[in-house]
């Protein structure tokens, strides 16, 4: 500290000497007689301004270099004589460790109609290809991740969907959901037969926020008809939830987790599903207008995609009662938002993802070394992939970035807002394949970040329902 002070004093004296020499020399060469105001301005104020400006600039640079100190959240003040406040705090702490069972998961994407096909495509490095029907402003084919042989025209022939026939993206989304419902309908009868009359079936349909101005009742009726093969008393209660991004979609899953685990006697089976399509002319034009469309000149932008997912969710107690196999548990969603996008310039930091991952592992008690895979929803963009890998931190050095960290979006394009849930469906399959916990990281959104843990269901019979 003493040496720093000496440097500042020495630099100030040197600046004063240089300014005086230059000013006095200038006055002498011009035979100028300075006034008292000139003496004060040029021989006193000017050197002080230069030294002060230097000190301010140096202080600002040191502030930028210093790491930001996270401010720990203040714990709520609890009075010892307030049993309700203490009970609420204990309940909140317990809820952080809630987990929900995934009985089965299904996907349909541009690279296949199953999770295995999707993971194989990612492993083989399959990428979206140029479109044969759409071009960009320069006349070059647009790269799209579209599902082949998708019959959207068949949806237009349905009288109940006639009012949506002019919306290509909605028609293709319905066609995607129809494929999913065919697979789900094959799986449900076995589960319902085991459950008997005690089970309550609920369907939660995640839709893009742009649909909230549409006739959602007509859409619900279509989904109800798609599940008409079920016994009438088991027809599901359907709710539609418009969302604007991955975090909102994952929050829907988190709400289901909370609702089921808050009721220890819950016999609810929840079908969570969603589909999105953004490969029509209007969607491509909108991306181009917002500078978000991948082109040969701008390869760090997004590739439009389409796809859908469906998951059957239930409490661990219900899974145990029905004696279902090949199920996994998923934790609460740990989520947050960046202060700026990763492509806004500067060094790419994975600090937020690291904080979310560390907090989640602390709550669940899972060791880093037991995790063999991290499934990402990110795509081909280098900054997003770098952020995710850096966010894993030193605790995951045993993971191979290519083999053990599949990036789903690189093969299926942008599936916002359901990309994180598609990746989570793949994480469920990875748990069964590796018989170990799997991290699912969502960072395809420009700001939203989320981390979820998928785990094998413990064999021990005395594990508490609703906790890991």
Image: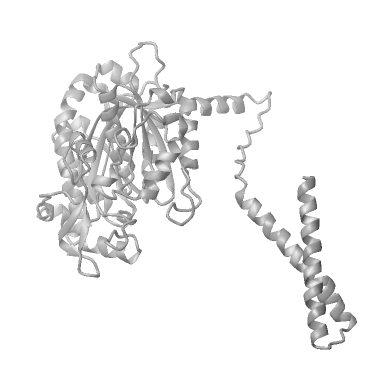
Quadrant in the picture for residue 420? top left
> Does residue 312 sit above or below 157 in this rendering?
above
Question: Residue 110 location in percent, x, y?
Answer: 18, 46
Question: Residue 282 location in percent, x, y?
Answer: 24, 63
415 or 400: which is nearer to us?
400
Residue 46 visible in this rendered orientation of the protein: no
Residue 109 falls left or right of residue 1: left
Residue 8 visible in this rendered orientation of the protein: yes
> Does residue 312 sit above or below 212 in this rendering?
above
Residue at 76 percent of width and 63 percent of height: 51
Residue at 60 percent of width and 45 percent of height: 68
> Does residue 262 sit above or below 124 in this rendering?
above
Residue 189 falls left or right of residue 454: left
Residue at 37 percent of width and 44 percent of height: 385
149 or 3: which is nearer to us?
3
Quadrant containing the N terminus in the rendered view: top right
**Labels in figure, total:** 0
Quadrant in the picture for residue 398? top left
Question: Residue 374 location in percent, x, y?
Answer: 35, 33
Quadrant containing the C terminus in the rendered view: top left
> Does residue 34 sit above or below 114 in this rendering?
below
120 or 356: which is nearer to us?
120
**Residue sitting farthest toward the right:** 36
Residue at 33 percent of width and 13 percent of height: 459
Question: Residue 275 location in percent, x, y?
Answer: 24, 46
């Amino acid at each position: 500290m003493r040496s720093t002070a000496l440097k500042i004093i020495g630099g100030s004296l040197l600046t004063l000497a240089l300014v005086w020499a230059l000013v006095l020399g200038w006055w002498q060469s011009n035979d100028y007689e300075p006034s008292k105001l000139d003496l004060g301005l040029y021989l006193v104020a000017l050197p002080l301004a230069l030294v002060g400006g230097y000190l301010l600039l140096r202080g600002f640079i040191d502030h930028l270099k210093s790491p930001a100190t996270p401010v720990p959240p203040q714990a709520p003040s609890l009075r010892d004589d307030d049993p309700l406040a203490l009970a609420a705090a204990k309940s909140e702490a317990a809820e952080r460790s809630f987990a929900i069972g995934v009985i089965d998961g299904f996907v349909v994407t541009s690279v296949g109609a199953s999770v295995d096909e999707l993971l194989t495509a990612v492993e083989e490095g399959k990428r979206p290809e140029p479109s044969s029907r759409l071009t960009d402003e320069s006349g070059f084919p647009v790269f799209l991740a579209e599902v082949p042989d998708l019959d959207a025209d068949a949806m237009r022939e349905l009288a109940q969907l006639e009012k949506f026939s002019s919306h290509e993206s909605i028609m293709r989304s319905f066609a995607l959901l129809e494929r999913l419902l065919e697979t789900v309908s094959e799986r449900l009868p076995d589960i319902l037969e085991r459950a008997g009359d005690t089970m309550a079936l609920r369907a939660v349909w995640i839709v893009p926020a742009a649909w909230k101005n549409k006739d959602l009742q007509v859409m619900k009726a279509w989904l109800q008809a798609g599940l008409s093969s079920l016994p009438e008393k088991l027809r599901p209660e359907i709710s539609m939830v418009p969302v604007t991004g991955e975090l909102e979609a994952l929050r829907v899953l988190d709400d289901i987790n909370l609702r089921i685990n808050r009721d220890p006697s819950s016999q609810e089976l929840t079908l969570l599903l969603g589909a999105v399509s953004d490969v029509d002319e209007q969607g491509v034009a909108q991306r181009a207008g917002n500078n978000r469309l991948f082109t040969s000149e701008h390869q760090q932008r997004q590739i439009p995609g389409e796809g859908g997912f469906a998951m059957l969710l239930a409490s661990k107690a219900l899974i145990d009662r029905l004696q279902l196999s090949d199920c996994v548990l998923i934790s609460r969603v740990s989520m947050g938002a960046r202060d700026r996008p990763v492509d806004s310039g500067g060094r790419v930091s994975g600090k937020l993802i690291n904080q979310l991952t560390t907090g989640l592992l602390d709550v669940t008690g899972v060791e880093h070394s037991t995790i063999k895979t991290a499934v990402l929803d990110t795509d081909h963009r280098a900054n997003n992939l770098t952020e995710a890998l850096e966010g894993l931190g030193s605790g995951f050095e045993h993971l191979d970035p290519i083999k053990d960290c599949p990036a789903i979006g690189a093969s299926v394009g942008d599936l916002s807002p359901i990309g994180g849930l598609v990746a989570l469906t793949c994480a469920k399959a990875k748990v069964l394949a590796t018989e170990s916990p799997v991290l699912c990281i969502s960072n395809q959104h420009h700001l939203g970040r989320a981390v979820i843990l998928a785990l094998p269901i413990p064999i021990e019979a005395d594990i508490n329902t609703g906790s890991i």
